[in-house]
Amino acid sequence: MEVTDKAVEIAALLTPTIASLGLELLGAEYLAAPGGAVLRLYIDVPEGSLAADGELRNVVIEDCEAVSREVSAQLDVEDPITGHYTLEVSSPGLDRPLFTPVQFARFVGESAKVALKLPQDGRRRLQGKILRVEAGGIVFELDGKEWLVAADNIDKARLVPDWAALGFAPAKTLPEGDARPGKKAGKHKPGRGARPGNKQDPIKRTNKPTADKPSSAE
């Protein structure tokens, strides 16, 4: 999560519009840059939503496209962003960003990477298990101890998926000189495990005139 006053303002503006489409706005990132800002929206389906076949519903590309269309039209009317910008709309993926204490509470027991606005005990970054949410803060397990971090001191946060538990861990490195049957002796480099493809690539729109090329959001 990367929460700025502008991101909070825009998220509050767009939340009802996205909710009207049967979706949830998890949060917004607003990245100002010379030549054009980037507004990044993360959407999801309400927890427990079911598809027509009775299975749990996931965000699909059509959801991102619908949000992009509606949001672009609203931003054109409300005009909360001065100058050119690129809009990105995507699903959160397994390494989902966390924007609010309610979202942290939903993933108690899982690990998260956190960047702080101000250092705490000499740290600006931490990675630990989410233990619980208390009034005004989130408690993490870090180095075997509990760490309470004020919610308003969190700049960015993302879940850290357990790729091994999900079956997507990299292959193990074989020891030097391993000459198992059918394998060439020597050191083997670990392969890179494929990650699940449940995260929708962001839909990008720009408010620049069609004669201009959209700014890169990367």
Image (spheres, rainbow, N blue to C red):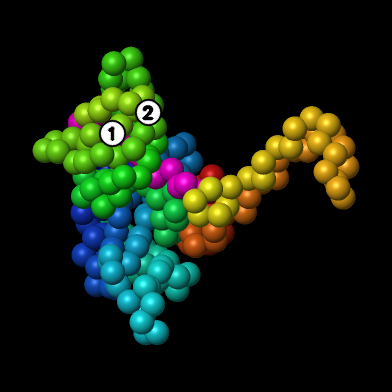
Residue topped by disc 2: 126
Is residue 91 visible to the viewer in this orientation of the structure? yes
Q: Quadrant of the C terminus?
A: top right
| Foreground label between 2 and 1 | 1
Q: Quadrant of residue 67?
A: bottom left
Disc on res. 52: none
Residue in view at x 74 percent, y 37 percent: 174
Which numbered disc, 2 or 1, marks the residue that appears first in the sequence? 2
Residue 138, placed above or below residue 102? above
Residue topped by disc 1: 140
The segment highlighted magenta reads 149-163
Compare residues 23 and 209 and report the one nearer the observer.
23
Is residue 73 visible to the viewer in this orientation of the structure? no
Residue in view at x 25 percent, y 27 percent: 147
214 magenta-colored:
no
What kind of element bears circle 1? strand
Q: Quadrant of the N terminus?
A: top left
Residue 139, placed above or below residue 89? above
Q: Residue furthest front?
A: 181
Left or right: residue 151 versus residue 57 is left
Identify which amino acid the numbered label 2 is placed on: Leu
Left or right: residue 99 versus residue 127 is left
Q: How many marks?
A: 2
Q: Position of residue 34 (x, y in %)?
A: 46, 36
Compare residues 33 and 127 and report the one nearer the observer.
127
Residue 65, placed above or below residue 163? below
Residue in view at x 37 percent, y 73 percent: 57
Q: Position of residue 103 (x, y in %)?
A: 26, 50
Q: Residue furthest top?
A: 122
157 magenta-colored:
yes
